């Protein structure tokens, strides 16, 4: 046990995900030895993230104003919406630079065993966005696991009467991998979604 | 240090750390087991897709030190798929929700880890296979599974003879705490009077008379589901969370 402030800092750091008591101690002593200006910057960043960050009223992504940067950008195509589970997924899709439409963050996936049903996600908000008829394509980019697939199935069924084009991200073999190591579920999906090579 | 191998159904997965998962399985020889699957959340994982819920798999476990239950979780080292029930279930929302309720019930009815529960295991495999084949309505398969699971666990309800005195049925009254159908003399306070057709349906589901169950009307199925849910929750003491989200045909 250390005295007062040092121990308090170690205790607080130890509450962070993935930080054990030894790591907490290492970080605490690093901060103690660090330049005061660096520590001040970290403190400001922590305070600001709690004060400023809100959730976009349109898509549910993290934002610093009422609406996020992507929803406010007039260059983004408003006729395509990509549905993702978390804000982290928005960043992942943005990195591909393939998608120029807008997003909708659900805030999770349907998982009855955890008690999460369709009403606990931002599905009602999505339906409101689709109601005005401006959107022509909905891309379902939920995780390729069981809950994500079930959520995609649920949304596809819900949107069917609206006459939208509903698409699901392809799943298959990772680029740079070996065919023999692929598991049978993924390989099966890759066969299912094979495409014509037009050369 | 030891390796052992078993086949089982994946009941539940929980995130662990950066890229790992804790996998709960109902196995043939060792009952319910929790094991760690390292790195399965990474896209380059070689067996991530095999340890998703509903997967019927052949697994190799590795236990460090003595294999006292509770002394650290075993690690999953190899997995082969025997049957992937996940894919057909996930494309049908009603079947998915019914299947999830089955997994949760199977987990709850096998409360001791490492204690063999062969009958429950075989029942679950059979129910998932029936559900994936879409041979019957998902809600009916679920109710049949719930009733038979309760029977395997020793809580078989009666839908014919009186559950208390054994008087030959059929009887009008149904009591959840009383153990099923009860005669006019034995009926405890709070007994309900379901339609005779509902009790026939539940009896058919318990004994496996699918021709009779498939021919039943929707209103009796709904009433039957309500009774099954009440009966299950009474015996498990705590509710099954996914049961609330099961989609039933209107």
Image (tube, coloured by chain):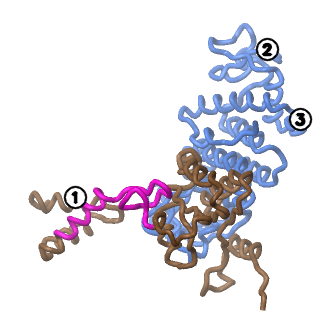
Chain colours: A brown, B blue
* Residue labelled with disc 2: B167
Q: Is B114 rendered above or below residue B144?
A: below
Rounded to the nearest angstrom, the CA distance separating label 1 from label 2 is 66 Å
Can you see residue B51? no
- Percent across and percent down for residue B2 are 53, 69
Between A192 and A130, the one lying in front of the other is A130
Q: Which chain is indicated by disc 2?
A: B
Between A19 and B186, the one lying in front of the other is A19
Residue B95: mark in rendering: none
Categorize mark 2 by other alpha carbons within 10 Å: few (<14), some (14-19), many (20+). Answer: some
Q: Are marks 1 and 2 in contact (CB under 8 Å)?
A: no
Is tag 3's residue or tag 2's residue first in the polypeptide sequence?
A: 2
- Percent across and percent down for residue A66 are 40, 56
- Percent across and percent down for residue B197 are 83, 24
Q: Which residues are magenta?
A: A40-69
Q: Secondary structure at mark 3?
A: loop
Rounded to the nearest angstrom, the CA distance separating label 3 from label 2 is 28 Å
Q: Are marks 3 and 1 in contact (CB under 8 Å)?
A: no
Q: Secondary structure at mark 1?
A: helix
Is circle 1 on the same chain as circle 2?
Answer: no
Task: Please report the residue visible at 69 percent of the width from the left and 66 percent of the height from the top.
Answer: A167
Determine the residue located farthest toward the top in the rendered image: B185
Residue A11: mark in rendering: 1
Is circle 3 on the same chain as circle 2?
Answer: yes
Task: Please report the residue visible at 79 percent of the width from the left and 25 percent of the height from the top.
Answer: B199
Residue B215: mark in rendering: 3
Can you see residue B109? yes
């Amino acid at each position: 046990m250390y005295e007062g402030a040092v121990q308090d800092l170690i205790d607080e750091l130890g509450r962070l995900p993935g930080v054990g008591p030894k790591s907490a101690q290492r970080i605490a002593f690093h901060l103690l030895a660090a330049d005061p200006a660096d520590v001040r910057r970290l403190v400001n960043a922590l305070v600001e993230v709690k004060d400023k960050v809100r959730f976009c009223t349109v898509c549910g992504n993290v934002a610093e104003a009422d609406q996020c940067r992507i929803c406010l950008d007039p260059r983004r195509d408003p006729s395509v919406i990509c549905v993702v589970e978390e804000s982290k997924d928005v960043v992942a899709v943005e990195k591909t630079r393939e998608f120029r439409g807008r997003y909708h963050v659900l805030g999770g996936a349907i998982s009855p065993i955890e008690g999460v049903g369709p009403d606990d996600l931002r599905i009602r908000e999505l339906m409101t966005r689709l109601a005005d008829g401006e959107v022509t394509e909905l891309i379902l980019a939920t995780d390729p696991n069981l809950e994500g697939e079930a959520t995609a199935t649920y949304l596809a069924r819900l949107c069917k009467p609206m006459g939208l084009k509903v698409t699901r991200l392809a799943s298959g073999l990772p680029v740079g991998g070996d065919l023999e190591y692929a598991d049978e579920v993924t390989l099966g999906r890759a066969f299912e979604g094979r495409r014509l090579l037009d050369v | 240090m030891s390796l052992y191998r078993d086949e089982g159904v994946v009941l539940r997965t929980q995130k662990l750390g950066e890229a790992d998962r804790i996998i709960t399985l109902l196995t043939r020889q060792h009952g319910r087991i929790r094991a760690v699957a390292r790195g399965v959340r990474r896209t380059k994982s070689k067996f991530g897709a095999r340890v998703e819920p509903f997967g019927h798999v052949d697994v190799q476990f590795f236990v460090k030190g003595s294999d006292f239950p509770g002394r650290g979780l075993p690690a999953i080292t190899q997995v082969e798929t025997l049957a992937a029930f996940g894919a057909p279930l996930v494309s049908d929302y009603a079947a998915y929700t019914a299947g999830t309720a089955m997994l949760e019930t199977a987990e709850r009815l096998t409360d001791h880890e490492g204690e063999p529960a062969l009958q429950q295991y075989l029942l679950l495999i059979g129910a998932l296979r029936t559900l994936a084949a879409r041979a019957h309505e998902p809600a009916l398969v679920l109710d049949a599974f719930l009733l038979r699971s309760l029977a395997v666990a020793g809580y078989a309800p009666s839908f014919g003879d009186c559950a208390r005195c054994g008087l030959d049925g059929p009887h009008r009254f149904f009591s959840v705490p009383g153990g099923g159908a009860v005669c006019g003399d034995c009926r405890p306070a709070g007994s309900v009077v379901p339609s005779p057709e509902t009790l026939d349906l539940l009896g058919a589901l318990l004994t496996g008379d699918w021709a009779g169950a498939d021919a039943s009307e929707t209103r009796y199925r709904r009433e039957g589901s309500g009774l099954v849910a009440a009966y299950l929750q009474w015996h498990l003491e705590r509710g099954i969370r996914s049961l609330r989200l099961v989609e039933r045909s209107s």
